[in-house]
Image (cartoon, rainbow, N blue to C red):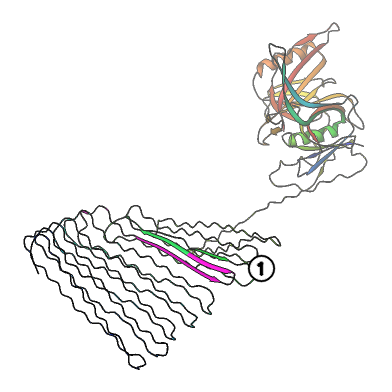
Amino acid sequence: MSTGKFSRLLVEVLVSNTPTFNTYDEDITDTLSLSDTVTELHSWTLIVSSALSLTDQAFEAGNLLISASNSLSLSDLATGGRAIAVSVSSVLSLTDIVQRHIDLLTSNQMTIVDAVDTNQKLVSASSILALADVALGGIQNLSCSSVLTLSDMTKLSDTFTQSASSVLVLTDSATPGLYNLFASNALSLTEPEVFGDLGNIWTKNASNDVGLSDSVTLGNAVYSRSLPAEIDIVQGLTKYLQLTDTVSISAPRVVAAADTLAMLDFVELAGGAIWNRSVSDFAGIFDHIAQVNEQSVSNVLDLTDEGDVSYSLSTFISFSDLADVSKAHTTSNDLGISDTVFVQGTYSRDIVDTVSMQQSVAYIRIQEGTLCTYTPFIGAGVPGDPPPPSATPPVLGYGRLTLTYPPDIPTSTVTLRNPDWGNTDTLASDRINRVSRGGTLIIFNDPMWPTQQTLQLAVLALTEAQVSELLTFFKATLGLLIRLADWEGRSWLGIITTPDATVTRNRDCSHNVTFEFEGEIV
Amino acid sequence: MTTILQGPYPNVQTSTVLPNPQLADIENCDIKINIKRSMTGKKRTYVQGGGKRKLSYNFNLTRQKGLELRAFILAYSGSQILLTNYLEETWVVYLMNNPFEFTSSARGAPAGDLVTIKLDFEGIKL
């Protein structure tokens, strides 16, 4: 024991006990207790170290129980109130080997606790652990496992960067030649939730990076699975998960590759309003089997969207099937869509078509005198059509052309000779005559509209007295209603439309006159 | 064969049988063509018309048959009528005369005057 700028304590203890051969109880125990203490208040460098090397060996082929164990407890403590750099480290290397026995058990259990509690600006606490378990030999049950528990925690107020991370690398390998082959990785990651006031934290990030790689070799088949996963939380929730299963096989046998994926996304913010809210799942499933006689590739996808009222719900489904085989190609997509609409009201609408049918009957009777007599053939018509003409002819007689005024009680009468041939009975009616753009002719005549009946009369061989009397009558009845009795015994009421009718005196002292009368038969 | 006028069309109720018209009856298409000529001499024609045709018949009727035709005209001068002519052609036509002039031309048989009238029809042939 000495003091100064450099001080070193080195204690080396070697204990060697040689056991007696051919005994049933063999016990080799090494017990070592080391305690190093250095106290120096003014030294610049302070190092406390312990170096220990233990070697236990037991050699006996016929022994039933052989145990070789090392128990080591290391406790290092360095305390310095004004020290600039403080280092506490423990380095431990354990190697256990057991050979040629039925029950083999090799295990390493180690607990490492690093604690740093200081107010210094740079704080680091880390544990590095490497475990390598190897089990060899032609034995029936072979188990090799590693159990590792890592717990990292940082908690310090007023820090700008806060990080807690765990890095874990697991590698399991099982070689062929066994009846049961199993390689598995079980991993559970938990990111602690941050409590308290988050007002000064701009970015909240919780991430897990997971990489799993399993590989099993069985005969000619190699089954491997890789799982890269990433989970990020930045003002929302997004999951991206990709599973890839690959089975490669050279000999025909039953091979199945299946992925079961369940995703549930839920975003909720209590006590506040979220204007832009998005929940989405993306699943990319790709199945591929090549070069087998019977192959089946199927994707079953069940999507369920739920949203509040006035939110739009949409589901996009895309199927892509690929069958690559030389013997048969069958590609099919089966899609079943079931829509349900809840109707709160049912309204019945009656459709009524009204067909209006009308019929009429017309006939023609072939008989003698049809072309000469008044014989209209009047059948049954349709209401609304113009009324048919009279079935009976007007009564005709004989008479002299006579003009009288006034019609009822005549005071002025002019009698003339009957008109000569060529007199005209004219019918003029008011009609609407139109031709459409396409050339269709449309004529309309309301039966209520008046029809002008005009007689154009030419009277010849009148005397001077008759002509004079006629002209006087024209002047006296100018524009007045008169009665005209024609040569067929019919009586007309009307006016003379040509009071300026011309009277022609011929060379034979005869007189001719032509005038028009417009009226109606009474 | 005779000439038959039946009206109104299509619900025919009244039929009038007339003798055949006189010779020199007229039939022509009812088509209007408007020709426009540009300064370069290029012609553009605008045509209006369809399947309509015009018929013009002159009838010599007895006084009684003239009165029957007169009553028929008074009833159906504004309606479509069915015309069956001496060629056994059936036409749906309008009476286009306005006015209708019944002229007493001579003494007729068996009694009364001989009445002549010219009827103009315009329509389509069925």
Q: How many marks?
A: 1
Horizontal side of residue A343 vs A492, given as left or right: left
Q: Nearer the viewer, residue B71 or A190?
A: A190
* A354 magenta-colored: no
The residue positioned 71% from the left and 24% from the top of the image is A518
Visible residue check, residue A431: no
Q: Position of residue A97 (x, y in %)?
A: 38, 78
Label 1 amino acid?
Glu
Label 1, secondary structure: give it.
Answer: loop
Above or below for A123 versus A371 = below
Q: Quadrant of the N terminus of chain A?
A: bottom left
- Residue A321: image quadrant is bottom right
The residue positioned 78% from the left and 10% from the top of the image is A464
* A219 magenta-colored: yes
The residue positioned 86% from the left and 28% from the top of the image is B59
Q: Position of residue B9 (x, y in %)?
A: 76, 41
What segment is highlighted magenta in the picture?
A199-225
Q: Position of residue A510 (x, y in %)?
A: 83, 10
Answer few, some or many: residues within 10 Å of disc 1's Cα (few below 14, many 20 plus, some between 14 and 19): few
Above or below for A450 versus A60 = above
Q: What residue occupies the far top of the structure in this picture?
A: A507
Horizontal side of residue A40 vs A142, given as left or right: left
Q: Which residue is mark 1?
A: A294
Which chain letter goes with mark 1? A
Q: What residue occupies the far bottom of the structure in this picture?
A: A24
Q: Nearer the viewer, residue A242 or A6?
A: A6
